[in-house]
Image (cartoon, rainbow, N blue to C red):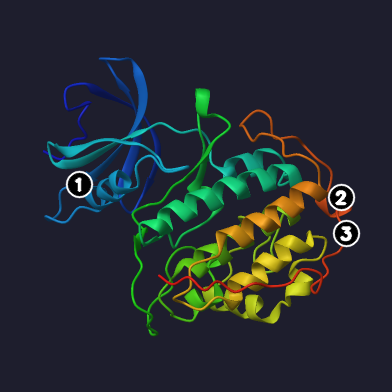
Amino acid sequence: MNKVPIWVDGRFRLGDILGSGLYGVVYRARNIINDDDLAIKLERLINNASSLEHEYRILKHLEGGAGIPRAVWFSREATFHALVLNLLGPSLHDLFIMHNRKFSLHTVLNFRDQLLLSLEHIYSHNYVHSDIKPQNVLVGRGDLEQTIFIYWNTTTQAHMPFRHGGHLTGTPVFASINNHLGVVPGHRDDLESLIYMLIYFLHGSLPWFTSDHEKLPTSSILARKVDTTIEDLCLGIPPEVTTMLIYSRNLAFSEDPDYDYLRLLLRDLHAHWISVSPITSSSIPKEHSVAKEVPLCQLKTTPLRRSTRHV
């Protein structure tokens, strides 16, 4: 009775397993009507609530935004809920490992620009992602191979009122300090997580995370985050990235990031560090250390700006 179906909706034929998680299992699939390659998530029917249905509704609400995966179909198939999505390529985590844990500054700037657009679109609909990490950013395929897509496992949620006493949401390595302390995640926390991810790609490590094999307790990760100064964390990183981290940590919970200001920092980076190379699964170069390409960060060179816009 609980056997995984071979066909979904009579037109999607399941293939190999691509991954799994708390939501269930994701399969490669093919639409036999138009010969498209797709991905299908299957979730067993346990009760009336479905995390896949929640994900489907959010994707439809965000449909058409920069870097938002396309939800094709959702319904019930036998004893499963099924969500059909467009098939994407490898994650930034996979590409980072494939290229010996080194991305060039140009590559990092490229996907930072795209991710800011995606987050701005998500925030414009009053959602918070709350699990920004390399595994949740995927490269497109075919005509979209120069586009990256922000992904989630139903962690995206509505922006809720400020409160303490909650549990950490998302992945400890890239979570904001406030998230660790039990403050409900807001837009500022996604931005802080994004910056940790960028620093990780530029350095190849973080003081609280050096490899997939080192699994520190969440309490130890928080302690190292608190104890690491911004100057030490940003050693060898362009000052504009440092400014973004300071800015994100100074945002109030109800403040929406000032995207005009963040784009100004991006323009400064583009002006100083030449043009950005496209990011694809085949074109990410094996660059030498980024720390040799840029000067040490100067914490006082770029003035901070506070947003006056509120959620």
Residue in the image at 32% along x and 42% along y: 25
Element on which disc 1 rests: strand
Question: Badge 2 is on which residue?
Answer: 293
Mark 1 to mark 2: distance in Å? 50 Å
Element on which disc 3 rests: loop
Question: Badge 3 is on which residue?
Answer: 295
Q: Amino acid at mark 2?
A: Glu
Residue 85 sits in which quadrant? Answer: top left
Taking 293 as reference, is 25 left or right? left
Say the numbered circle drawn on residue 44: 1
Task: Pick whichever, 266 or 2, lies toward us.
Answer: 266
Task: Pick whichever, 223 or 175, lies toward us.
Answer: 175
Task: Pick whichever, 112 or 123, lies toward us.
Answer: 123
Task: Pick whichever, 171 or 305, lies toward us.
Answer: 305
Taking 27 as reference, is 309 left or right? right
Name the mark nearer the viewer: 1 or 3. 3
Q: Is residue 30 above or below residue 67?
A: above
Mark 1 to mark 3: distance in Å? 52 Å
Name the mark nearer the viewer: 1 or 2. 2
Horizontal and vertical percent for residue 162? Answer: 38, 80
Binning the other alpha carbons within 10 Å of mark 3 as few (below 14), some (14 to 19) or many (20 upward) gives: few
